[in-house]
Amino acid sequence: MTNVREAAEAIQNEAYFEALSDLLFQLADDDFIVSYRGSEWLGLAPHIEEDIAFSSISQDTMGHAAIYYQLLEQLGAGEADELAHGRPAENRKNAIILEEVNGPGTYLEEPRYDWAFAVVRNYFYDLYKKIKLESLKNSSYEPLAHAAVKINMEQYYHLLHWETWFRQLTLSGGDARSRMEAAIEKVWLDFEGVLTLGAKGAAMSSYGLIEGEDLLKQRFYSKVKLIFEQVQLPEPKPCSMKSGNGRNGEHTEDLETALDVLSEVYRSDPKAVW
């Protein structure tokens, strides 16, 4: 790991700065939107204990996004609040599967959300997030490495929570298992968008910001293969990215709508201190 002075000198290298910024935007935007989708389950989760637990996880995850946006602010990319709330959809780096709505209806009007989809999406996401955090703890950019250590302390419990739900529902049989299998198939069609590091992934690895994409994917698939064996599911095939690559700014109307809601208060007075 480089020291602070070496990191500062490296940032003067435009290619290093671009790779670092791209990585931070991916990390921030992923956590930002998936935490929002989690917040929409408030009052709608299967039982009150889960309502509290999911709300806490979503709050933690939004805090993780804030950490990454603050690191970007320190790099001169803009003010953290503006980066979180003021950027248009086409500038976002989050994976498309994370912006997808929880189900038909809206939070205020006839929400008919899919709990199996929520469990599968959050489990796979937090599984890969944990893998990335373990890699980021050795990042060449020391502030990011320190952030990863801090975030990873909470991530252990997030992953444990979703793995418990995943196992219980998948092993329940009947309708629960059928719904979980349908959710896995749905999430798998677009989960490559989470796994990819985008066009600058090779540069991120070469600068020691994070390990290579292929290695991270290998770890993910190894863990998924093991859990699938334990719940009697067939060995997973490589996932795909049918809806587009969010790392390239490709997004859906679901993100546009979410950002309108998320940024409503901020846009009412961007100069206010929240």
Image: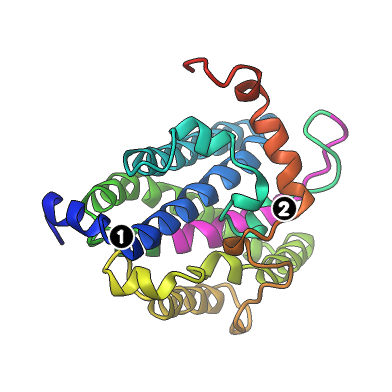
Q: Residue at x 31, y 51 (%)?
A: 148
In the picture, the quarter occupied by the N terminus is: bottom left
Calculate the distance from the C-alpha at mark 2 to the C-alpha at mark 1: 27 Å
Residue 149's disc number: none
Residue range of the region highlighted in magenta in the rendering: 109-130
- Judge whether residue 120 can be spotted in this image: no
At label 2, the amino acid type is: Glu
Looking at the image, is 196 positioned above or below residue 163?
below
Specify whether residue 118 is painted magenta: yes
Taking depth in this image into account, of 202 and 67 the one nearest to the observer is 202
Residue 136's disc number: 1
Looking at the image, is 149 positioned above or below residue 14?
above
Few, some or many C-alpha atoms within 10 Å of disc 2 (few <14, some 14-19, many ≥20)? Answer: some
Where is residue 14? Give x, y as percent: 33, 61
Taking depth in this image into account, of 115 and 258 the one nearest to the observer is 258
- Judge whether residue 123 can be spotted in this image: yes
Few, some or many C-alpha atoms within 10 Å of disc 1 (few <14, some 14-19, many ≥20)? Answer: many
- Model colouring: rainbow
What secondary structure characterizes most of the magenta part? helix
Where is residue 231? Give x, y as percent: 58, 72
Looking at the image, is 39 positioned above or below residue 254?
above
Taking depth in this image into account, of 162 and 192 the one nearest to the observer is 192
At label 1, the amino acid type is: Leu
Q: Is residue 206 left or right of residue 173?
A: left
Where is residue 23? Give x, y as percent: 42, 58
Where is residue 118? Give x, y as percent: 66, 51
Q: Is residue 54 left or right of residue 147?
A: right
Task: Report which residue position mark 2 lands on.
Answer: 100
